[in-house]
Every structure is written in C-alpha cells, then in structure tokens.
Amino acid sequence: MIKKHIPNTLTLLNLLCGVIATIFAYNEYYMHAAVFFLSGVTFDFFDGFAARMLNVKSDVGKELDSLADCITSGLLPSMVMFTMMCSSLAGINGDWVADWFPVSWAELASWAAFIIVMFSALRLAKFNLDTRQSESFIGLPTPACGLIVVFLPFLRGVDFMADALNNYWVLLGITLLCSYLLVSEIHLFALKFKNFTWKDNREKWTLIAFSVLMIAVAGWKAFPVIILVYVAMSMVISSRKCACDKKR
C-alpha cells in the first residue's frame, strides 16, 4: 500500500532538507540554511501527523524520525555554531603542529560547536525510551534548540547584540547552555491540543500569539527569542504545579 510509505517519505525529506541546510551553513549562506531548516521541521511535523491519520505507525518510522532529527536539528545547528565560532576567531592564525593534521587553532577551538549534535543524539535516544513525555517534554526538544541556534546569525545585525555574538566565549556559553537544556529534567509544555478552548490551552495560545507578533515585528530574528520565552513560560508553569502539589 502506498499510504504506509507516506510518513517515511516525509521523514526522509526532513533528512534531505537537513543535509542541504548543513551544506549551506558550512558556506555561511545562513538565509538558505534557515529556509531548508524550516522546511525540514515542517516535514518533521507532518510525518507524525500523517502516521497517526493513516494509522501506519511503525518502529522503523520512529527510529528514522530520530535519525532525521539528529541531522536537521542536531548537525545543522552545530555547523551554524561552528562557522560563527570560526568567524569570531578569524584573527587567530597558526596551523596545527602536525603537517598531517592541517587544522588552524581557530577551527580546533570551534569544534566545541559539535557538542550540540552529541547532546541532540543523546536527547533523541532518551526521548525514544522515556514514557513520561507523551503529554509534555522533559528537556528542550531538538527542533527548539535548532530554532535558537540556526537563527542566531541574524541577531548579529542587532546593534546591541553584535559584539556578544561575535565573541567566542559567548558562543561557547550558548552551546553549553543549549546542550544542557537538551538533556535536562526541565518540564516543557507541548503544543498539543485536545480541544481549542482558552481555559484548557491558555499557555499555548499565549505563546502562539506572542510568536505571531514577534515574527511580524522582527522576522527571522524572532525565533531565538520565542524559544527562550517558551522555556521561561514552561519553567514558571512547572514551578506553580510543584507548589500546588506540595500544598495538597
């Protein structure tokens, strides 16, 4: 049956978009990388939706989805961060000490960016085995991490952020923070709707409205801010629930 191949085809398109975006990111074509990243994330959303609608879920599809996410939302953000780090260290010269390993000191230091893809792989493996994440997320989802990092280059055009995002140590700090959030025990609400009422989905509609407003005002620059607000909202909601549980 053709329909059983539709979800996996969408997943493979997600993977393809991630590979193409990574090539663009390596060559510092950040706009093109961002477009293919968003295309990949869109395919990632619809592959699961299609699997549920067509009732063709499979173990292969689940594993394939994680592999595709590791490229689109793991390797791609790492490559974006790598090129930004290299750019921030552009004034550092000198080749690696061995002729058989021709890597500059700037490139060597920038390899720290690939911590993101390592922790993305760990995050995806944990997610596949964690039965607690059916209604919400524990730790930052890989696409959310991608939305932060892939769109960071656009924030370098903002005057008060330009110097910070051209500083290697700031970029390393962002890398470590994102990597920690991926595998943390922070509870984040999922944008899954059982109904569309305001009462049951107050935080979801608030985030959606804020996101639409930010994108309309700031364009590409809005995505990192949206994810940070999402994390902050989730932490506030989680702390309130913990407080209520203690009172009970």
Image (cartoon, grey):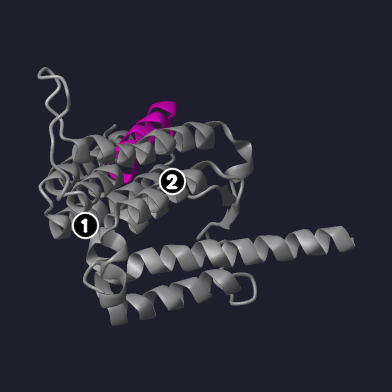
| Image quadrant occupied by the C terminus | bottom right
Q: Residue at 27% across / 66% down in the picture?
A: 163
Name the spot of residue 55 as percent of width and height, x first: 44, 40
| Image quadrant occupied by the N terminus | top left
Q: How packed is label 2: few (under 14 Cα within 10 Å), some, or many (20 or more)?
A: some
- Amino acid under disc 2: Leu
Using the rendered image of the protein, determine whether residue 102 is visible from the camera's viewpoint: yes
Which circle marks residue 176 in the picture?
2
**Residue tagged by mark 1?**
34
Task: Classify residue 90 as left or right of residue 231.
Answer: left
Q: Report the Cα–Cα distance between label 1 and label 2.
A: 22 Å
Marks 1 and 2, the one that precedes in the sequence: 1
Say if 52 sits above or below 197 in the image.
above
What is the magenta range? 57-75
Task: Classify residue 155 as left or right of residue 119.
Answer: left
Mark in the foreground, 1 or 2: 2
Name the spot of residue 195 as percent of width and height, x first: 57, 67
- Amino acid under disc 1: Ala
Specify whether residue 111 is painted magenta.
no
Using the rendered image of the protein, determine whether residue 3 is visible from the camera's viewpoint: no
Name the spot of residue 106 as percent of width and height, x first: 20, 41
